């Protein structure tokens, strides 16, 4: 009896030590990236895996949305705001052992803004006139005109620094400078990363991490409850959050994102090229019913493409309030008194699939029939985002302060308004904070008044983790599952 008790005690102590020494993490995410090059695709799942973990930029976002130093330890800005001189950290190496220098910065920015660039946010770099290597650790960037958002733009995942030596295989074997190195990708299942032992900055506390792809909300719930995974970022089953909250094994993280969730509308395709039709559709939508039905009450209604937590947000939800009678009247005025049919192509996230079904029922009530097609992520990117072959879709735009996408008539929803485009051009060169604030408010009113898209809700950041996991971001100021500061409680 005594020996058995002693053995049990020793086993318990050993088990506690093992728990304290845990240095790996398995984190769930709903979407699998189409590839791992954040500089050549719009899929947010790429940044979720790679941002800060594998790739870094000259600047970077902090968990509070602030813009902080990244690979550049400091910078100087000329008095006229046209020249930015960045001073790189010394001793930075890519994961393949090659040294980072100013030539890599020039290569990355020239590639992003080049004529044949496939960067999803190429507009971020449009104002760059020249990138010059001053010396191995100094790079000078000259702008065509002042840009108050330039340091902010450089913090995006689309602006990370890559090397010419490894660019050929970047989509399947990403080589960056981050605190983790790419290790393995089992298609359809997981991506594995390991700690970069030669990292130039504060090393990661985790030795390794695994991103596990679980698209089905029921399966995500089961995996968490079985403790097969340690955390789930963007948990897809909000109806299960109360169960986790009541379970001492877990903690629930509820925060905000930059994700404007919209019923995106092909403005160049009839009948959506008629503003009265778009207005009718806006009044046919009951936002709160969508939030309650698809998100179980999580989410903030929006009436324009702007985050409610931003100080310049204008609440325009009343302008497109739920009013099916008005929707029918507007359709009649537009010549569609008998209604019409269109496509509704839905990507994999549960907010889109669930929300799309609710929206389809609401539109049907006013005479708009939708043919729902559920697409996997690569299909959605090919058909909707690149091919513009859609009538309607539901998607959350999770890039920070991205109202400028409405100034690009070639963007997938094809909104073309010269007044808005001129306003965005003026905003780019305006440095006065009050003037910028007024411009942003005007921009919100323009796209709300044009009913460009059906503005639904701001996507919440919903996460679940084991109680011992610490350092996960509660809010999501950018598309990232940043594991560089994550550890297990001792």
Image: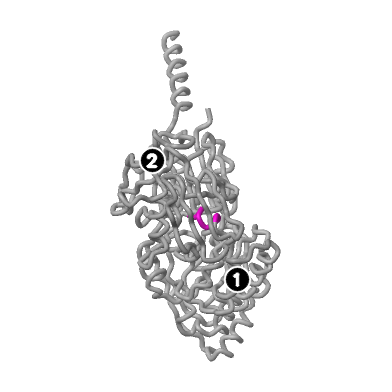
Q: Residue at point 68% right, 72% down?
A: 318
* Disc 1 from disc 2: Cα separation: 39 Å
Residue 354 visible here:
no
Secondary element at image label 2: loop
Secondary element at image label 1: helix
Query: x%, y% of residue 445?
Result: 64, 73
Q: Nearer the viewer, residue 464 or 144?
A: 144
Mark number for residue 93?
A: 2
**20 displayed left or right of 439:** left
Mark number for residue 426?
A: 1
How is the structure coloured here?
one colour
Dot 1 and dot 2 residues touching (CB under 8 Å): no
Residue 79, above or below 289: above
- Earlier residue among tags 1 and 2: 2
Query: x%, y% of residue 45?
Result: 43, 54
Write down the region rendered in magenta: 151-156
Mark number for residue 417?
A: none
The N terminus lies in quadrant: top left
Q: Is residue 336 magenta?
A: no
Query: x%, y% of residue 323?
Result: 64, 77
Q: Is residue 152 magenta?
A: yes
């Amino acid at each position: 009896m005594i020996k058995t008790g002693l053995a049990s005690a020793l086993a318990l102590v050993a088990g506690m030590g093992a728990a304290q020494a845990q240095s790996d993490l398995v984190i769930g995410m709903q979407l699998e990236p189409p590839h791992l090059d954040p500089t050549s695709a719009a899929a947010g799942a790429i940044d979720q895996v790679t941002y800060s973990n594998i790739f870094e930029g000259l600047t970077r976002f902090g968990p509070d949305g602030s813009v902080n130093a990244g690979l550049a330890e400091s910078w100087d800005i000329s008095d006229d705001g046209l020249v930015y001189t960045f001073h790189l950290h010394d001793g930075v190496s890519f994961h393949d052992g090659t040294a980072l220098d100013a030539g890599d910065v020039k290569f990355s920015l020239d590639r992003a803004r080049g004529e044949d660039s496939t960067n999803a946010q190429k507009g971020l770099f449009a104002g760059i006139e020249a990138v010059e290597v001053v010396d191995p650790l100094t790079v000078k960037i000259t702008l065509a005109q002042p840009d108050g958002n330039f340091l902010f733009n450089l913090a995006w995942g689309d602006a990370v620094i890559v090397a010419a030596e490894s660019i050929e295989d970047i989509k399947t074997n990403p080589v960056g400078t981050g605190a983790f190195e790419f290790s393995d990708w089992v298609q359809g299942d997981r991506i594995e990363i390991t700690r970069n032992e030669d990292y130039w900055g504060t090393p990661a506390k985790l030795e390794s991490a695994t991103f596990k792809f679980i698209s089905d909300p029921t399966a995500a719930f089961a995996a968490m409850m079985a403790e097969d995974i340690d955390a789930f970022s963007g948990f897809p089953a909000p109806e299960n959050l109360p169960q986790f909250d009541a379970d001492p094994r877990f903690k629930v993280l509820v925060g905000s994102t930059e994700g404007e969730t919209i019923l995106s509308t092909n403005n160049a395709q009839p009948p959506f090229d008629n503003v009265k039709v778009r207005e009718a559709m806006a009044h046919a939508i009951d936002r709160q019913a969508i939030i309650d039905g698809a998100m179980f009450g999580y989410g903030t209604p929006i009436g324009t493409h702007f985050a409610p937590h931003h100080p310049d947000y204008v609440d325009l939800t009343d302008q497109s309030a739920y009013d099916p009678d008005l929707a029918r009247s507007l359709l009649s005025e537009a010549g569609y008194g008998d209604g019409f049919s269109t496509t509704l192509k839905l990507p994999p996230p549960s907010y889109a699939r669930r929300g799309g079904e609710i929206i389809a029922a609401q539109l049907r009530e006013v005479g708009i029939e939708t043919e729902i097609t559920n697409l996997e992520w690569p299909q959605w990117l090919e058909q909707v985002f690149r091919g513009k072959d859609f009538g309607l879709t539901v998607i959350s735009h999770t890039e920070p302060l991205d109202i400028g996408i409405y100034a690009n008539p070639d963007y997938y929803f094809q909104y073309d308004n010269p007044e808005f485009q001129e306003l965005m051009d003026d905003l780019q060169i305006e440095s006065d904070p009050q003037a910028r604030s007024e411009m942003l408010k005007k921009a919100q009113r323009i796209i709300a008044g044009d009913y460009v898209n059906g503005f639904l809700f701001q996507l919440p950041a919903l996460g679940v983790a084991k109680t011992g996991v610490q350092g996960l971001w509660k809010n999501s100021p950018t598309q990232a599952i940043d594991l560089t500061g994550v550890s297990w409680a001792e």
